[in-house]
Amino acid sequence: MNFKATLLGAAAAFAMAPAAMAERGADGHVNIIYWQAPSGMNPYLSGGTKELEAASLVIEPLARYNEEGTMVAWLAESVPTVANGGVSEDLTSITWTLKEGLLWADGSAVTSADVRFSWQYCTAEGGGCAQTEKYNDVTDVEIVDDRTVTVHFGVSKPFPYGPFVGAQAPIIQAAQFADCLGAKAPECTDANFKPQGTGPFTVTDFRSNDVVSLAANPNYRDASKPAFATATLKGGGSATDAGRAVLATGEFDYAWNLQLAPDVLAEMASAGKGTVVSSFGTLVERIMVNQTDVSADLGDRRGTADNAHPFLSDINVRKALSMAIDRDLLVEIGYGTAGRPTCNVLPAPAIYKSSANDACLVQDIAAANALLDGAGWAMGSDGVRAKDGVRLSMLYQTSTNAVRQDFQALIKQWWAEIGVETELRNIDASVFFGGDPASNDTFQKFFADVEMYANNFDGTDPESYMANWACEQAPRPETQWQGNNMPRFCSDEYDALVAEMATTGDLNERARLAKAMNDMLMQEYVIIPLVDRGRVSAHANTLGGVILNTWDSELWNVADWHRVDG
Amino acid sequence: MLNFIIRRSGISVLTLFFISFVIFMLLAMAPGDPTASLPLSIPAEVKAAIRESLGLGQNPFVRFVKWFYAFFWIEPMYTIEQLTGLNTYWDQQRIISFQSRSPVMDIVWQRIPQTLWVVGLGYLVGTLIALPIGVISAYKQYSWFDQIGTFISMVGFSVPTFFTGVLLIVIFSVNLGWFPSIYDTTLVVDSWANFVKQVKQMVLPVSVLALYNAAQISRFMRASMLDNLNQDYVRTARAKGLGEKAVVLVHVMRNSMIPVVTVIALGVPTVFSGAIITEQVFKVNGLGQLLITAIQANDIPMVQTLTVIFAVLIILFNLIADVLYGVLDPRIRYD
């Protein structure tokens, strides 16, 4: 019997060999460079992208997004839906089943207790978990059996894929983190630097903000993967250095996030050692148009809905501002292949993308001028339009960043051509994005007429992203100036769409609602989208299997990476 | 001398307290937020909870006292426990970095070796080159050697390391492929092959730093030698019939070294603070890179700890320079 089984096994292995080709560790070593070095390996403690991606080599979620933004089962057997019975009819619970025989790198079994623990860890009081939003409304994670958990929500969740989905919400080992709940989380340095994982690699040495050394996980669920026996994730330097190390000198195999001038990248790639890859997600560089009066005389009520903006409350002015912009030129100067012009604040996934606003792709200064003339904004002798003593003179703020300052200069020029005077201002990113209510320079407080930055959303579901522009989301003194509705846009009709989406489960219906919200924002011109920004990375020509993914960690399929003949 | 050292140490303690307080308050008042670099998709309430868990909600004076106690009492006690095995530290809260949520001093200790190896060696090599160049340049003033030495030190002095560093990378890594452009901090020298690797990866950063340091120190050495070569005691020594070798290397050099030693000693703390730019260019990831990433991430405990460590070193090496004065010049007495 044993002999027969062995023979059968051998025969099967033989048959499989051409398909599987490599065995685990056959391809030696892979070198990855992240020019921003990861400071930890626990995405719950640090929400930064660099930590998230580094951790994704080691710890994994139940399901994640592939390169097309489609959800795929990862540690779970399948993605639960209402159709397959995994999600309850009333949308208040979702039941996940772990794959059979899953092991942690230390050889112990992955059970539903680990899944439940991951939720407890992130929601423990005083832990400062960066991903609590993923576990919003979760009332309990019930252990059904060793491999099955049911997540219960306090409300009906049309999109129940927050918990345990994507690189932001992976499963951590209960045994390792048991004593690290809440305020004790930072004390577990060993666990935070070397988490036990189910992923293709395990950490052998971690040096904060410097380098991570990894080795293939001996208990990885696919016995033939990963192809690399060891891996190094080096951090530090700049995007230029990282690009050079892959494309020009060939010292490294993969470089992340090469946000470089298009000609610099092309020059490096001409050495023929590596390939630049880019892919698009939901990141949009946009201008927010303030609907409130920010004049300092208003004291406490400055920048609140109490006082409408003296001229940006006129839709004709907002529309003219958008029409005057040449988005193609912005892309060419700032992003090259890593950007494309967009007229939507919600540019992807495909089912949510509206085509109703594409007129903005063509710059039309003459029409913008005509529009302003028609609206009664008469050109003054100083080249600035005015009406009833109100001059079209604006403050335009953004964060300090070479590309953004180029954009500011160009746009100022275009706006000057339609008789709008612009004063430029840039603020250090750590202050601008800092959210300190005591500072007047934050992007939430928005004490300027227009401001520019980029934003996106995690995963593929735009519900909470689109809800950003509901009335109640406006930052104001009552909310300690927190909130996401920077333009302070407020419309009952929009709020109704937000409320409707929160209770709609049908995907096509959700897409219709999201598009409608996008179109409303675009046609009101309270947000002026500029560039749909892609992700650019580079890999050596000898590294195969790289599929750039903007919906999840870039290293999501590192188990499939392998050596090829360059 | 002992009296002097004790007195100076006493003053140093007060100075250090003052320096750490000023640095802490500057950092506390400076705008910036450690959660600013997180993705915008993380909501504001979550960011507020993170700030709370980092202890940022507390009064800055309370935070300062906590930090001061941790730095000057808990951390030394922890080190003693690690070294001796005695139970001196009692699991008290150590200084925790905002970025990595791990003890600051552990990361500092991890970073010191590469900084000392690369930046320290750059300083040492620079000094060793600079002294003979300075002596010969002065002794043969306006000779071709002096002219070339002056030219090279002007280049080394005025061309910034972010330029020379990248230039060397483009020539020796990209075009010739002789040396790596990225420093591997995990390399353990346990075999001949790895030793060669280590030497190779140190060549470029050490050369950049050596050029920069040598330029400065050789100018000081040359000027100081020139001052002394025309002194009466030199003429006396020569009149006594002493050989040129003895006159220059014993009489003139010893006297010329007095100001140069100060310059060299005061330069040593800058070795620890790391050559921020050079470390970044070659990805050496030593203390300089640690400081700059901490500043970018608003990691206040890390920045505070590192700057105070640098302050301690500067005070210490000032003291050492003063003591060396007395050794080199018997006329200088502090008692």
Image (cartoon, coloured by chain):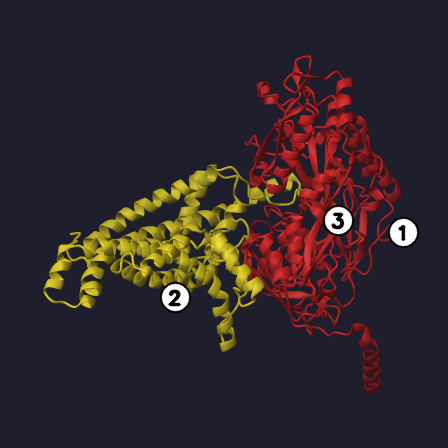
Chain colours: A red, B yellow
- Asked if the residues shown at circle 1 and circle 3 are in contact, with their CB atoms under 8 angstroms apart, the answer is no
Question: Residue beneath label 2, please?
Answer: B84
Disc number for residue A392: none
Mark 2 in CB contact with mark 1 (< 8 angstroms)? no
Name the residue that disc number 1 marks. A83
Q: Residues within 10 Å of mark 1 (few under 14, many from 20)?
A: few
Horizontal side of residue A513 vs B257, given as left or right = right
Instruction: Using the rendered image, report if marks 3 and 2 lie on a common chain.
Output: no
Mark 1 or 3: the one toward you: 3
Q: Nearer the viewer, residue A194 or A375?
A: A375
Give the number of marks.
Answer: 3
Tell me the quadrant of the picture where the N terminus of chain B can be found.
bottom left
The kind of secondary structure element at disc 1 is loop
Residue furthest to the bottom in view is A3
Q: Residue furthest left?
A: B240
Q: Is residue A525 left or right of residue A47?
A: right
Q: CA distance from mark 2 to mark 1?
A: 64 Å
Helix, strand or loop for disc 3? strand
Q: Are marks 3 and 2 in contact (CB under 8 Å)?
A: no
Looking at the picture, which amino acid does disc 2 mark? Thr
Residue A280's disc number: 3
Q: From mark 3 to mark 2, how far is it between C-alphas?
A: 56 Å
